[in-house]
Image (spheres, rainbow, N blue to C red):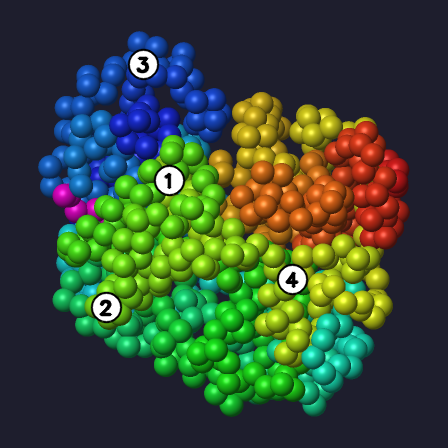
């Protein structure tokens, strides 16, 4: 194994949770290397008085019985400190977590030199889609045994460090010089690595360095047959009934390109859609939101810094290596994202953002929220690019209620403004007064709606008066200044009319003050429908149920896209437990109603599934969406991925990867949702008039997402017994039936043909 000729220690901990001092270290392991060779290994279990959470027992295979008779951390502290040493470079995968947890146990390594292998891997393995140790071990074939045990993680991390070191030897002269110059100005760990970088550069640029763009999981769609779009010439709303067909958006774009009319195609998830589409660069343009574009002046300022944090250093190297113009051009990882949004991203005032709107081609692709921001702000740089003749074709219109709510939201994140107040006594003093007002108003409630009476007090008036100077203080960064402008609006009594405003304290103590429109339809009418010819794509048979977004006037019958069906069965005779006891072959996505259920099933079924070599990936217990997606792709079947419907809607997978979708719980919105519960009061029957239609629209979107991922025989099973036991079940089954064709058994499944409705 080729490793750097440094004195370093690779370490890892297993813990009962993520909060130092609250959660405890239950295992420690380390490997010491000197001069390019491993000289020592060490591991120990550690006894604790506290219980080990069931999820941790399942994840690590460390049980309370295994810790009986083992030394406590107090017993092992001196030994562990000796193994770590006093001057060796500390190396680890997401090592900041281990350093924080060890500090909670009385070993303070915060001033030591360290290198995070996940960040280093993101630099030299840009082709990977995740940098979790499990995924990287699978793809790079690292020795990772036992998984989720400290010594197994240390072995895999050491091998990953070695593979990163090998790739550093493949750098050509310019890139090697950039790395050396940047790391020499970085945190102590990266400075040490710079001192031993190879002195001889590679002759050729390696293939892995040709592009920093994270590989797309979606397959580019081919230009194909077009669809029939209704002709519109004046402001108003025209409806198209959407299709489950994965190629629908590509066909819309291709059809728009043949039209002579300027058309803005509006999508919900811009980056994901663009990754799937084949676009003509000279005939169309993607309008990126400002935060996803690189501000060249900000990038230059970062690169001219005389010193870098660890995250700034790796990001600065990527900027020089890949010369990006947008977020998507870089393999961003970890806290590099905070550096991007805090220091590098465009704002609406940036010239790089403004340039997008100059000399637009006839076809433009933009996201819901950005369009709505343009329509709501007469000073927006994109406003002049819209003309009365521009046709707006809004896809995923059933999401307009949610995306408009976000686009027109006023929000203050107290933690963000507090961070900006460092070194600013006047702002700190103001925030202290704001905090006192918040605590008085919310009176220990997690969610407290604001009333006119709250905003008419002398304290609220004093806060408004003290905000004014900050709004014109150009020395304040734009984002906290924008938060304070939103706070000024929220605290103004006259602006509370027709809005829902509240104070919210979330788990962990973070506080937010937010305000959103009470009703969305009137706003869409005034900003959009009455100004521009607008086409909305809506789920089939939903024109009569989209009350929150459609105008009250009668509309013409929707134009349907060609129907598309898939094997879909109602199987209320099969429970979620039945499926987990006897999982089918292939790769299955299972949707359940809450994270609590996911945690329960993870604890109950993971041991038996592991014995049968079934990969079980669970939301919140297997990392974030990006990591889970990568592991689902890399895992050999049989594989089960359990997550909530709200998370699955935005999942990106290649075509022909998922064999089945199991909807174990109908994805109803929670009736006490902060915003939806307030909108529901406007309906005589909130369940049938509001929540049930939102369920139907979400079911359509889930099926459409699966159609992009499914194999040729990919099937849908809906197992929620409420379809048979509740009065509304017949309505929901009737809605689903339009998308179903009979499921036929595949050779792989060996299952009997399933009952259809």
Q: Is residue 56 visible?
A: yes
Outermost residue, left direction? 86
Q: Residue visible at 25% across and 49% down?
A: 431
How many C-alpha atoms fall within 10 Å of the one at disc 2: few (<14), some, or many (≥20)? few
What residue is pinned by disc 2? Answer: 473
Q: Is residue 293 left or right of residue 718?
A: left
Give SS at disc 1: helix
> Camera-side residue: 608 or 402?
402
Question: Magenta part of the protein: which range?
Answer: 111-115
Cα separation, mark 4 vs mark 3, equals: 57 Å
Q: Residue visible at 84% across and 62% down?
A: 563
Q: Main secondary structure of the magenta part?
A: loop
Q: Earlier in the sequence, mark 3 or mark 2?
A: 3
Give SS at disc 4: helix
Residue 212 picture quarter: bottom left
What residue is pinned by disc 1? Answer: 441
What residue is pinned by disc 4? Answer: 521
Q: Nearer the viewer, mark 3 or mark 2?
A: 2
> Camera-side residue: 587 or 169?
587
How many C-alpha atoms fall within 10 Å of the one at disc 4: few (<14), some, or many (≥20)? many
Q: Nearer the viewer, mark 4 or mark 1?
A: 1
Q: Earlier in the sequence, mark 4 or mark 1?
A: 1
Find out whether residue 398 is within the magenta segment.
no
């Amino acid at each position: 194994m080729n490793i750097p000729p440094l004195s370093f220690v690779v370490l890892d901990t297993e813990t009962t949770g993520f909060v130092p001092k609250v959660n405890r270290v239950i295992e420690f392991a380390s490997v010491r290397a000197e001069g390019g060779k491993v000289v020592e290994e060490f591991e120990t279990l550690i006894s604790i008085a506290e219980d080990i959470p069931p999820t941790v027992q399942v994840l690590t295979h460390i049980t309370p019985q295994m810790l009986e008779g083992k030394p406590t951390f107090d017993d092992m502290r001196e030994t562990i400190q000796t193994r770590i040493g006093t001057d060796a470079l500390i190396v680890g995968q997401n090592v900041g977590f281990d350093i924080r947890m060890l500090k909670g146990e009385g070993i303070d390594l915060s001033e030591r030199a360290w290198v995070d292998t996940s960040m280093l891997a993101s630099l030299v393995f840009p082709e990977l889609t995740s940098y979790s140790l499990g995924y990287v071990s699978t793809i790079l074939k690292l020795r990772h045994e036992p998984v989720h045990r400290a010594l197994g993680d240390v072995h895999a991390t050491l091998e990953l460090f070695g593979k990163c070191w090998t790739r550093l030897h493949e750098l050509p002269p310019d890139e090697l010089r950039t790395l050396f110059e940047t790391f020499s100005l970085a945190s102590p760990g990266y400075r040490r690595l710079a001192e031993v970088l190879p002195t001889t550069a590679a002759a050729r640029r390696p293939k892995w360095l040709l592009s920093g763009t994270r590989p797309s999981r979606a397959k580019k769609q081919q230009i194909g047959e077009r669809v029939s779009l209704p002709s519109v010439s004046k402001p108003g709303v025209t409806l198209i009934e959407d299709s489950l067909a994965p190629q629908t958006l590509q066909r819309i774009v291709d059809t728009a390109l043949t039209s002579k009319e300027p058309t803005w195609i509006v999508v919900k998830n811009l980056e994901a859609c663009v990754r799937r589409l084949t676009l003509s660069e000279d005939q169309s343009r993607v309008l990126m939101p400002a935060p996803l574009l690189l501000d060249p002046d900000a990038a230059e300022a970062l690169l001219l810094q005389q010193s870098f944090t660890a995250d700034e250093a790796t990001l600065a190297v990527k900027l020089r290596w890949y010369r990006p113009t947008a977020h998507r051009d870089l393999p961003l990882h970890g806290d590099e994202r905070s550096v991007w949004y805090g220091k590098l991203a465009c704002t609406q005032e940036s010239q790089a953002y403004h340039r997008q709107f100059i000399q637009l081609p006839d076809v433009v692709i933009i996201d819901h929220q950005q369009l709505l921001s343009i329509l709501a702000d007469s000073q927006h740089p994109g406003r002049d690019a819209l003309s009365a003749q521009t046709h707006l074709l809004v896809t995923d219109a059933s999401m307009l209620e949610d995306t408009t709510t976000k686009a027109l939201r006023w929000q203050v994140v107290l933690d963000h403004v507090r961070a900006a107040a460092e070194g600013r006594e006047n702002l700190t003093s103001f925030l202290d007064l704001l905090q006192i007002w918040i605590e008085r108003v919310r009176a220990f409630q997690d969610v407290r709606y604001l009333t006119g009476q709250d905003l008419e007090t002398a304290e609220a008036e004093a806060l408004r008066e003290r905000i004014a100077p900050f709004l014109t203080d150009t020395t304040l960064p734009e984002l906290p200044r924008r938060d304070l402008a939103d706070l000024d609006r929220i605290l103004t009594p006259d602006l509370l009319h027709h809005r829902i405003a509240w104070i919210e304290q979330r788990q962990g103590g973070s506080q937010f003050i937010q305000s959103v429109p009470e009703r969305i339809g009137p706003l869409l009418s005034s900003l959009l429908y009455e100004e521009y010819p607008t086409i909305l794509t809506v789920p089939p048979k939903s024109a009569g149920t989209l009350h929150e977004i459609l105008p009250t006037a009668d509309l013409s019958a929707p134009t349907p896209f060609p129907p598309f069906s898939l094997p879909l069965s109602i199987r209320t005779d099969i429970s979620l437990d039945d499926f987990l006891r006897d999982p089918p072959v292939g790769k299955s996505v299972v949707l359940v109603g809450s994270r609590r259920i996911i945690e329960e099933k993870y604890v109950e079924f993971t041991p038996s599934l592991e014995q049968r070599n079934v990969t079980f990936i669970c939301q919140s217990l297997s990392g974030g969406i990006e990591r889970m997606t990568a592991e689902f792709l890399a895992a050999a079947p049989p594989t089960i991925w359990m997550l909530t419907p709200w998370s699955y809607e935005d999942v990106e997978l290649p075509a022909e990867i998922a064999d089945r979708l199991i909807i174990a719980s109908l994805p109803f919105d929670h009736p006490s949702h902060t915003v939806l519960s307030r909108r529901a009061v406007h309906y005589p029957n909130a369940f049938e008039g509001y929540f049930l239609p939102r369920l139907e629209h979400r079911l359509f979107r889930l099926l459409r997402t699966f159609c992009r991922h499914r194999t040729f025989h990919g099937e849908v099973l809906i197992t929620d017994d409420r379809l048979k036991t509740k009065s509304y079940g017949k309505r929901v089954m009737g809605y689903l039936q339009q998308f179903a064709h009979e499921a036929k058994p595949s050779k792989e499944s060996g299952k009997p043909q399933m009952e259809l409705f």
